[in-house]
Amino acid sequence: MRKASNSQTSDRLIVFRAVDKWYDLPAGRFFALRDVELKIAKGEFVGIVGRSGSGKSTLLNLIAGIDKPNAGHLLVDGQAIDGLTDSQLTQWRGRNVGVVFQFFQLLPTLTVAENVMLPMDFAGQKSSAARRSRAHELLQLVGIAGESDKFPATLSGGQQQRAAIARALANDPPLILADEPTGNLDSSTADEILTVFHALSVAGKTVVMVTHERDIRNVVDRTVTLTDGRVDEIVERPHVGGIPA
């Protein structure tokens, strides 16, 4: 059963139009995604679910511009990113996308604040003092300002994921992509991280999260289920507001 979003076209941040992604292997052509039609609105918190090999991470990589579709078109905030060169994609991604990974991917030799500053350094944004101020502001936003001068290894898994979220927000991108962000956390900490993502979407960020979790329908605005590379089901949460207790 597919239930389309009631968003207006002008509010759509991500639009998939008949997107295929395949890989030519010795055994033949393998379709990771096939004929994907999907629209995600600005400010939505969307969960992408499905079994391993269903195409979840491939879909996220296409949105991030890490990979390109073989057929169809993909627009993000009106930009047809499937037509950009690799160098253009790198610049576009730095301005528009923040990525959060399952295993945090924090650099162990940098402090938490320095990890958050890193995307700003790469983008050449702000002075050194302004970058540090921005990093502390973001760490305060995710609730770990007191850990800013510590190294990642001294933090809990939940604190490291909060630091990773702060890093993803460093350049104030409109889009946050999360690949199994709770997969390495206990259930209580996972709930805390989902609350952070929910708050970001309420504040206007678009959050697209790939997950194996099946009990997220009371948290996200919509759940998109992939089966064998196809969009099989889209279910909207029947109410809006805060995360239910």
Image (cartoon, grey):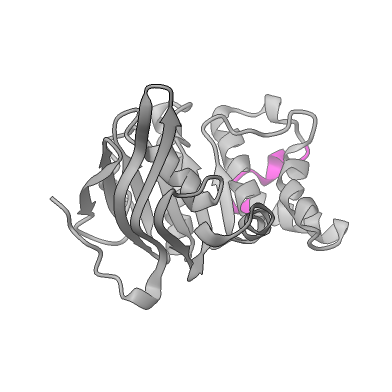
Question: Is residue 141 covered in magenta?
Answer: yes
Q: Nearer the viewer, residue 210 or 133?
A: 210
**Does residue 244 appear in the picture of this structure?**
no
Up-down: is 115 above or below 127?
A: above
Residue at 61% over, 49% down: 168
Up-down: is 167 above or below 91?
A: above
Residue at the top extreme, as displayed: 27
Residue at 53% over, 50% down: 64
The quarter of the picture where residue 96 lies is bottom right
Q: Nearer the viewer, residue 235 or 14?
A: 14
Residue at 30% over, 42% down: 216
Residue 86 placed where, x, y %? 65, 52
The quarter of the picture where residue 212 lies is top left
Residue 115 placed where, x, y %? 73, 41
Q: Is residue 242 left or right of residue 238?
A: right
User: What's the magenta region?
Assistant: 140-149
**Does residue 212 appear in the picture of this structure?**
yes
Residue 203 placed where, x, y %? 48, 64
Q: Nearer the viewer, residue 66 or 120?
A: 66
The quarter of the picture where residue 89 lies is bottom right
Up-down: is 181 above or below 93?
A: above
Residue at 65% over, 29% down: 155
Question: Is residue 70 covered in magenta?
Answer: no
- Total labels: the figure holds 0
Q: Is residue 143 left or right of residue 199?
A: right
Up-down: is 163 above or below 130?
A: above
Residue 92 placed where, x, y %? 63, 60
Q: Nearer the viewer, residue 124 or 85?
A: 85
Residue at the right extreme, as displayed: 128
Q: Is residue 72 left or right of residue 66?
A: left
